[in-house]
Image (cartoon, rainbow, N blue to C red):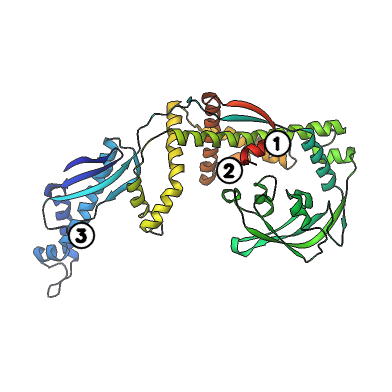
């Protein structure tokens, strides 16, 4: 068999395979011999059909099967031996007029190659690493929310300032139907809050999701909108009021402190505020890291230039998946996924350049810390090692969870790499300033 590659462009090639009689004749003959005792042809007893008739009736189908086995195996070995780094899988060029009776057959496969490119993680950039602090306004607001949350609910006839509303956000056109309880002052704009003033149980108020809350991510909590859809979502939703309550604030005493943080851990208002500040800034640090990672990703995608085998990938997308895509659908899908593919390649190059590897111990340590954090959120602040490791073992026995956690470990390692290499400018801001920087408000 003769195999060669013909370049179409820098990232697309055709593999040409010439299959000769010697490559398949032995296996075809073996299959014909195996078929003879089983062959059934009118006018002959089973097993007594002449070989030439068996070949005439079954030979072409057997030859096609065996040739395809030969080329599939040869193609796999060729890709491995040439160390070809492919995007997608080889696409066979169909030949509807192929003469299967010929002894020599030619097959062509189009392939898309991973591009070769330089990655400069230390390139000059305007990326900012935010240090988000909890200011007095935020801390005092959180104290007030705690008092309200643990206070006494007093039913009201009509909505007034400071009320809590229980009801359902709904929009049939957008698949939203979520029961929730929300404080009136959670809505960002006073004009939105005023829409509810004076309303009664059973009334319906229509609001638009654009700028509804201080942070667009709150749409995930109150409307159960997916993360990919929260940014710039601008649709009308109805809120049907089912209950209206005012709140008598809870007293800031030891009973409340113990309920919040465990017995004896907080004893004064000052200690409560210090704990709120500590917890809030730990959460803000995670959000700031997420923004930093997203900003670095966007910078690298915009500033790392390389060609993709776009036309090949659009054709390949038409062949994969349960539902075959039309050319127009494949065009849309490619446009949707191109940015992610580019960063996937950049991510792989960054890991290779910096010799970053993910070990099972990395995965186990990451999972252990995640489990401990989750347990702490539910009040289990001092679980035993045996209990934690039992949960870790169960989680890591699930392959889907392993893949999900592995992605998170990779993201964490890349974040540390980007912090070191990208050398972002550090800027201390309040949470309100961080939100404005994140969403341009």
Q: Which mark sits nearer the N-terminus, 1 or 3?
A: 3
- Is 147 in front, or is 156? 156
Q: Label 2 neighbourhood size at 10 Å, few (<14), some (14-19), many (20+)? A: some
x 55%, y 31%: residue: 415
Q: CA distance from mark 1 to mark 3?
A: 64 Å
- Relative placement, left or right, of 113 versus 410 is left
Q: CA distance from mark 2 to mark 3?
A: 50 Å
Q: Can see residue 106? A: yes
Q: Which residue is depicted at the point 76% across and 50% down?
A: 190
Q: Identify the residue shown where x is 73% and y is 39%.
A: 380
Picture disc at residue 395: 2
The residue carrying mark 3 is 96
Q: Position of residue 338 (x, y in %)?
A: 43, 44
As drawn, the label of residue 431 is 1
Identify whether 86 is placed above or below 326: above
Whether residue 205 sits left or right of residue 311 in the image: it is: right
Residue 59's quadrant in the figure?
Answer: bottom left
Q: Quadrant of the C terminus?
A: top right
In the rendered image, which quarter is residue 3 located in?
Answer: top left
- Whether 319 is drawn above or below 140: the answer is below
- Between circles 2 and 1, the one closer to the viewer is 1
Residue 382 visible in this rendered orientation of the protein: no
Name the secondary structure under disc 2. helix
Secondary element type, mark 3: loop
Counting residues from the start of the chain, the first of labels 2 and 3 encountered is: 3
Q: Nearer the viewer, residue 97 or 206?
A: 206
Judged from the image, the secondary structure of the residue bearing numbered disc 1 is: helix
How far across and how far down the image is residue 354, in percent? Answer: 46, 25
Q: Residues within 10 Å of mark 1 (few under 14, many from 20)?
A: many
Residues under numbered marks 1 and 3 in contact, where contact means CB atoms less than 8 Å apart = no
Of marks 2 and 3, the one in the foreground: 3
Task: Pick out the residue farthest to the bottom.
Answer: 43
């Amino acid at each position: 068999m003769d195999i060669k590659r013909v370049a179409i462009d820098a990232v697309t090639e055709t593999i040409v395979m010439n299959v000769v009689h010697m490559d398949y004749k032995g296996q075809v003959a073996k299959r014909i011999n195996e078929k003879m005792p089983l062959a059934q042809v009118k006018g002959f007893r089973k097993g007594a059909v002449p070989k030439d008739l068996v070949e005439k009736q079954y030979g072409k189908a057997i030859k096609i099967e065996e040739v395809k086995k030969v080329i599939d195996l040869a193609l796999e070995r060729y890709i491995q031996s040439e160390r070809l780094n492919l995007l997608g899988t080889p696409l066979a060029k169909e030949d509807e007029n192929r003469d299967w009776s010929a002894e020599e057959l030619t097959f062509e496969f189009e392939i898309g190659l991973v591009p070769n490119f330089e990655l400069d993680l230390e390139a000059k950039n305007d990326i900012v690493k935010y240090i988000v602090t909890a200011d007095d306004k935020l801390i005092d607001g959180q104290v007030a929310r705690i008092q309200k949350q643990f206070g006494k609910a007093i039913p009201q006839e009509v909505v007034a300032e400071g009320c809590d509303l229980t009801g359902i956000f709904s929009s049939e056109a957008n698949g939203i139907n979520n029961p929730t309880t929300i404080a009136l002052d959670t809505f960002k704009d006073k004009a939105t809050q005023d829409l509810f003033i004076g309303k009664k149980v059973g009334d319906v108020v229509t609001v638009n999701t654009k700028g509804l809350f201080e942070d667009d991510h709150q749409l995930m909590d109150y409307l159960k909108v997916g993360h990919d859809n929260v940014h710039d979502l601008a649709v009308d939703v109805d809120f049907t009021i089912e209950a209206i309550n005012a709140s008598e604030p809870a007293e800031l005493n030891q009973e409340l402190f113990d309920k919040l943080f465990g017995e004896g851990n907080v004893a004064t208002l000052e200690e409560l505020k210090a704990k709120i500040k500590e917890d809030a800034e730990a959460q803000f640090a995670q959000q700031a890291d997420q923004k930093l990672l997203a900003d670095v990703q966007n910078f690298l995608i915009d500033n790392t230039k390389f060609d993709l085998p776009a036309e090949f990938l659009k054709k390949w997308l038409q062949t994969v998946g349960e539902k075959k895509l039309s050319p127009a659908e494949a065009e849309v899908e490619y446009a949707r996924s191109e940015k992610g593919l580019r960063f996937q390649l950049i991510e792989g190059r960054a890991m290779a350049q910096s010799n970053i590897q993910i070990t099972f111990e990395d995965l186990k340590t990451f999972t252990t810390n995640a489990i401990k954090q989750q347990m702490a959120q539910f009040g289990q602040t001092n679980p035993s090692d045996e209990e934690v490791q039992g949960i870790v073992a169960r989680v890591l026995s699930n392959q889907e969870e392993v893949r999900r956690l592995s992605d998170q470990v990779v993201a964490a390692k890349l974040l540390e790499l980007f912090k070191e290499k990208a050398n972002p400018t550090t800027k201390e801001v309040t949470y309100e300033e961080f939100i404005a920087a994140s969403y341009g408000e």
